[in-house]
Image (cartoon, coloured by chain):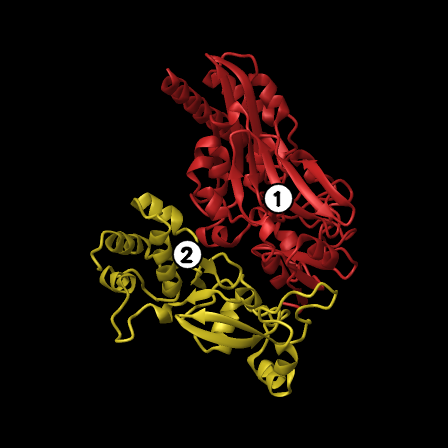
Chain colours: A red, B yellow
Amino acid sequence: MDNFAFFRPTSVAEAIDLASGDQGRDFLAGGTTIVDLMKLAVQRPGGLVDITGIEELEGYEIGSDRLRFGPLARMAVVADDAGLREACPALTESLWKAASPQLRNVARLGGNILQRTRCPYFRDTAYTGCNKRVPGSGCAALEGGVTSLHAILGGSEHCVAMYPGDWAQALIAFDAEVRTRGPGGSRTIPFAELHVLPGDSPEIETILEKGEIITSIEVPVIPAMRASHYLKARDRESYAFASASAAVGLEMDGGTVKDARIALGGVASVPWRAAAAEEVLRGKTFSEALAREAGRAAFADATPLEHSAYKIPLGADVVAGALMTAHARAQAAAKGEK
Amino acid sequence: MAREPAHPRPGVTRRLFLGSSGAVAAGAGLAGGAPAQAQQDPAVAPEALSKVTFKLNGKKRTLAVEPRTTLVEALRDTLGMTGTKIGCNHGQCGACTVLMDGRRVNSCLILALTTEGAEIVTVEGLADPDGKLHPMQAAFAEKDAFQCGYCTPGQILSAIGCIDEGHAGSAAEIREYMSGNLCRCGAYPNIVAAIEAVRDGQEG
């Protein structure tokens, strides 16, 4: 690993000041992504600004109207919160089905949503073609590479790297917001606008500016969160990135779907809301056939690569399966209320 | 293993050289819990060694490290505590698992400078001073929960964490919550048995 300067700010203002210059400094929280990528020489920051000493960025609150997560809350701690499990199972399941216990003990929520792609050509500097790592250098995946782990939604001719995260899918499904502070002041970003499609500049992954820091992740509570589920299909049963996953939530009015939320993981360049699939369900009588129709609709616009066509039927099944579980949860809740 | 020649880890020899040339003294006033500077001067400059103090197996230890030194490197190379193993060096295999403030972590992904004030427990700290094994160590021996032994220190620390975190309720839950520790010998069934035994208070 290259060496770097190390900073320990104790306030957000100080952290912004340290990271917003052109010295190539990055924030350090849990470090499970950036330390790994620094060892691989994929990221070579001139300095790390360790924000773990900033108390106001810790903690989380499970409110009745709003969930608020500090960016320094640990994945494992939030995943084990019984109140969150009841309020929104998909937010809990997408945390504990991610990574390993050791990583979840260290990784923080802010870093989790900003984790970078697992594209093997991005992670291995022996491949010279990676537009994300070296803008303009090409794409080893599209130029004869193995594309089984790549995006079939949202990719471009310059980059088909997949967004690997799980929790982000539950956040985007339930209209989360990200609050930030940076050199230009504070702002609130709809989660769906945080990540940007690769287009012709895949090195740009979010709209965050240099030195802009996430101060909280907030989710307004809606009825579909209670009957929610995160289903994750992967090559091995645990501790693997998604081959295809879905975060879903249902609000039922008797047998009719009042509200449906669907987001897709393991298949897209960015956290991916499947609006067309949600529309298939809204106002209809729920059935397995309808769930399967929604699953197919989620992938209607997918562009399979040479080795990733399998993700389309797998992803459709995952969406349908997640909806069946969410529906069962809605039914159980309705019975409990009677 | 997993030490890319292109990106060498900080060498022991070089560290000792820097230490004897006064770099430790230069860095000592700048870090080690000192209040962070508001100015642009780094708390620790790239090539400087600076002090970090943590409690290791109950004993306070102060050592000089570079910013890039990871906890497992500090343990093995600086302190000579080689019970903690480096497998993949990327947080994928769990061989480097230690307890940090009661939580199991991959020490290969933790920068040593970020352990200021932490309580670290490694496999060397598990047995009683008189040599009596920790119940989990005894259970691993009793249940034959290893073959080559390379992953075993990490497995044992992770197993202790698994029970402490309340995720050893069933064999299935143990398998899920031990998934961060790989065993190429395939001792998994016996590892699960050892954890169940300790959970049930049998001490092997």
Q: Say yes or no: labels 1 and 2 on the same chain.
A: no
At which x and y percent is residue A227?
47, 25
On the rendered structure, is A276 left or right of A157? left
Residue B181 is tagged as: 2
> Circle 1 — which element?
loop
At which x and y percent is residue B82?
43, 74
On the rendered structure, is A327 left or right of B24? left
Quadrant housing the N terminus of chain A: bottom right
Chain letter, disc 1 residue = A
Q: Residues at badges 1 and 2 in contact (C-beta under 8 Å)? A: no
Residue B64 seen: yes
- Residue type at mark 2: give it: Asn
Q: Nearer the viewer, residue A113 or A243?
A: A113
At which x and y percent is residue A272?
62, 33
Quote the CA–CA distance across marks 1 and 2: 28 Å
Q: Nearer the viewer, residue A114 or A286?
A: A114
Residue A147 is tagged as: 1
At 68% from the left and 71% from the top, the residue drawn is B46
At which x and y percent is residue B52?
55, 72
On the rendered structure, is B152 left or right of B10? left
- Residue type at mark 1: give it: Thr
| Circle 1 Cα neighbour tier, 10 Å, few/some/many (<14 / 14–19 / ≥20) | many
Chain letter, disc 2 residue = B
Query: Which of the 4 image quarters holds residue B187?
Result: bottom left
